[in-house]
Image (cartoon, grey):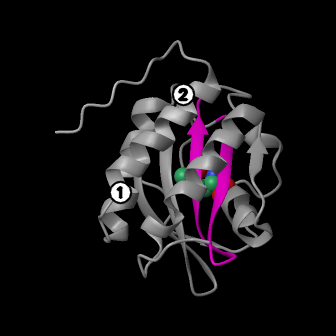
């Protein structure tokens, strides 16, 4: 049993530092990327409040394919450059979207989503996946959430790469 106990009153830098520590512990020694993505999605759900979707899209060929997640069933394939996830994957840059309805080409997988944060996961300099967080609250995410999720992406990149390798 894994019994992590996030403190909902903790400041975001502490919350995300604890999340990264927990994620490192969960993936340690486990080479299976699907198992690791599934546990990390569950961990995000446990640690980060006010979400309606949290999970992975993986770069496969010329697009993104749905990976392990928590939330409502979602669109399976997203072309690079399309939607918030495709923008993050194509640019290699975090996408912080306070109002999804104002984002050109936003793909609505859950009508409840109001704001979104997507962070690329990179290994060997390449985007191999994105982590996508949706919230039912407008402007739910800020720079501290982006920095925290980027730290998580860097920490677990090697554990979710198909080869199970280690990111530089
Ligand atoms: N909104 C995303 C699609 C994925 S769902 O939010 C789970 C996008 O625009 O890329």
User: Is 104 placed left or right of 43 in the picture?
Assistant: right
Residue 11 to residue 113: above or below: above
Q: Secondary structure at mark 2?
A: helix
Quadrant assignment, res 114: top right
Quadrant assignment, res 129: bottom right
User: Is 66 placed left or right of 27 in the picture?
Assistant: right
Question: Front-most of 164 and 77?
Answer: 164
**What secondary structure characterizes most of the magenta part?**
strand
Q: Give the distance between the C-alpha atoms of the residues marked 1 and 2, in whole angstroms.
A: 18 Å
Q: Secondary structure at mark 1?
A: helix
Q: Provide residue 91's location: percent of width, then percent of height.
A: 80, 68
User: Which residue has dot 1 on it?
Assistant: 27
Label 1 Cα neighbours within 10 Å, binned few <14 / some 14-19 / many ≥20: many
Residue 33 to residue 151: above or below: below
Reply yes or no: does residue 55 show up in magenta: no
Q: Residue at x 83, y 54 (%)?
A: 104
**Mark number, residue 150:** none
Q: Is residue 69 visible?
A: yes
User: Which residue has dot 2 on it?
Assistant: 15
Reply yes or no: does residue 119 show up in magenta: yes
Question: Front-most of 94 and 6?
Answer: 6
Q: Residue at x 60, y 57 (%)?
A: 154
The magenta region covers: 114-136
Residue 135 to residue 7: above or below: below
């Amino acid at each position: 049993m894994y019994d992590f106990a996030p403190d909902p009153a903790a400041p975001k830098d502490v919350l995300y530092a604890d999340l990264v520590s927990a994620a490192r512990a969960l993936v340690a020694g486990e080479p299976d990327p699907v198992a690791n993505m599934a546990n990390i999605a569950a961990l995000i759900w446990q640690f980060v409040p006010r979400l309606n979707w949290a999970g992975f899209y993986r770069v496969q060929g010329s697009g993104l394919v749905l990976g392990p997640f928590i939330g409502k069933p979602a669109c399976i394939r997203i072309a690079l450059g399309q939607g918030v996830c495709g923008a993050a994957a194509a640019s290699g840059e975090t996408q912080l979207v306070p109002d999804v309805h104002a984002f050109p080409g936003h793909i609505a997988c859950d009508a409840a989503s109001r704001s979104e944060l997507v962070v690329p996961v990179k290994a060997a300099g390449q985007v191999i996946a994105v982590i996508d967080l949706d919230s039912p609250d407008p402007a739910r995410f800020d720079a501290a959430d982006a920095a925290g999720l980027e730290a998580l992406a860097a920490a677990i990149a090697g554990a979710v790469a198909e080869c199970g390798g280690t990111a530089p």
